[in-house]
Amino acid sequence: MKRIMGIDYGDARTGVALSDLLCTLVGTTAVVPSRNREKALADLVRIAKENEVGTIVVGLPRNMDGSEGPRAELCREFAGILGDATGLPVVMWDERRTTVEAHNILSQHNYHGQKRKNTVDAVAASLILEGYLNSINRK
């Protein structure tokens, strides 16, 4: 089997989460600087290759009413570019409230300040991936 990679795309940092080989659990996480989009893209392509990823799941930031705004459009555009660069299928996944949940999780574990800033995107990516894995494993 091939791993699944979850992405929480952001302007400054992009969170990355990788599944285990059975695609049942979130394994490792990382954060890729994304101010330079081309470098971020190259880093994500490298991570996908090195970890034998078969599918990429990109968080889709919807509004609470389910509508999509400018941020969702940016994520869809990035997902398309990432799919072209890797040659892998890309799935968009509703990420409503993942960043809020990530902040709550980090607060419960006393992650504050710079430590939190450097971790929240990886935690959000793991929540996106976890939601997707749960949905495919229920089927």
Image (cartoon, helix red, strand yellow):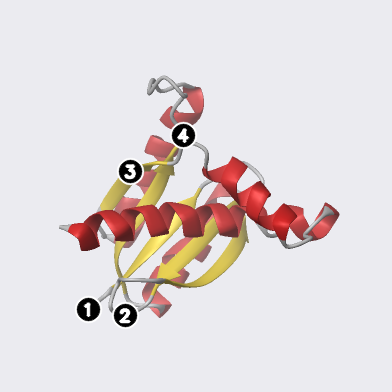
The amino acid type, in three-letter code, at marker 1 is: Met
The residue identified by callout 3 is: 92
Taking the image as shown, residue 131 lies to the left or right of residue 74, namely left
Which residue does the numbered mark 2 point to in the structure image? 21
Quadrant for residue 112, please give it: bottom right
Label 4 is placed on what type of residue? Pro
Q: Earlier in the sequence, mark 3 or mark 2?
A: 2
Whole-number angstrom distance, CA of label 3 to CA of label 2: 21 Å
Q: Earlier in the sequence, mark 3 or mark 1?
A: 1
Q: Position of residue 138 (x, y in %)?
A: 20, 59
Question: Label 3 neighbourhood size at 10 Å, few (<14), some (14-19), many (20+)?
Answer: some
Dot 3 amino acid type: Met
Q: Position of residue 123 (x, y in %)?
A: 58, 58
Q: Are marks 1 and 4 in contact (CB under 8 Å)?
A: no
Q: Earlier in the sequence, mark 2 or mark 1?
A: 1
Query: How far apart, in angstroms, are the residues tagged by discs 4 and 3?
Result: 10 Å
Q: Residues within 10 Å of mark 1 (few under 14, many from 20)?
A: few
Find residue 101 and name its label. Answer: none
- Dot 3 lies on which element? strand
Q: CA distance from mark 2 to mark 1?
A: 6 Å
Residue designated by label 1: 1
Q: Residue at x 32, y 54 (%)?
A: 132
Q: Are marks 2 and 1 in contact (CB under 8 Å)?
A: yes
Q: Residue at x 38, y 23 (%)?
A: 66
Which residue is the site of mark 4?
61
> What is the CA distance from the residue labelled 3 to the residue labelled 1?
21 Å
Q: Nearer the viewer, residue 46 or 23?
A: 23
